Amino acid sequence: MVTMALPFVYGIWLMPHPRTAGSAVVLLALSVLAGLPVLYGGLLLMRDAPAGAPLTRDR
């Protein structure tokens, strides 16, 4: 939850108003950081399931 809130907080309150390329790079890096837990969870689900099985725990 915190990693998902970081790009919002930076974009709304902390990003400097004369927007620069550096501030856009920081916002992009925070957005990628926010997506990493979701990607990691998806990879864990795919690794845990045998090929062709549904992605649920009740097999």
Image (cartoon, rainbow, N blue to C red):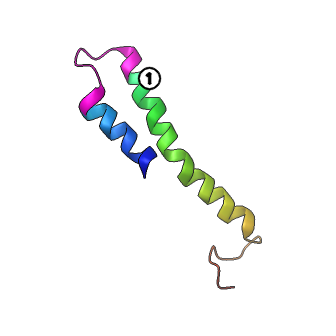
| Total number of numbered discs in the rendering | 1
- Residue furthest to the front in view is 2
Find residue 24 and report its image quarter.
top left
Tell me residue 13's x, y (percent): 25, 31
- Residue furthest to the left in view is 17
39 relative to 51 in the view: left or right: left
Tell me residue 18's x, y (percent): 24, 14
Find residue 10 and report its image quarter.
top left
Relative to 36, is 11 above or below? Answer: above
Whether the magenta-drawn stretch holds residue 56 is answered as no
Tell me which residue sits at (43%, 25%) in the image: 26
Label 1, on which residue? 25
- Is the residue marked by circle 1 packed among few (<14), some (14-19), or many (20+) residues within 10 Å? few
- In the rendered image, the quadrant that contains the C terminus is bottom right
SS at mark 1 in the image: helix
Relative to 3, is 56 above or below? Answer: below
Tell me residue 6's x, y (percent): 39, 39
Please give the range of residues in magenta.
13-23
Relative to 35, is 41 above or below? Answer: below
Tell me residue 2's x, y (percent): 42, 47
Whether the magenta-drawn stretch holds residue 14 is answered as yes
Relative to 2, is 14 above or below? Answer: above
Tell me which amino acid carries mark 1: Val
Tell me which residue sits at (44%, 23%) in the image: 25
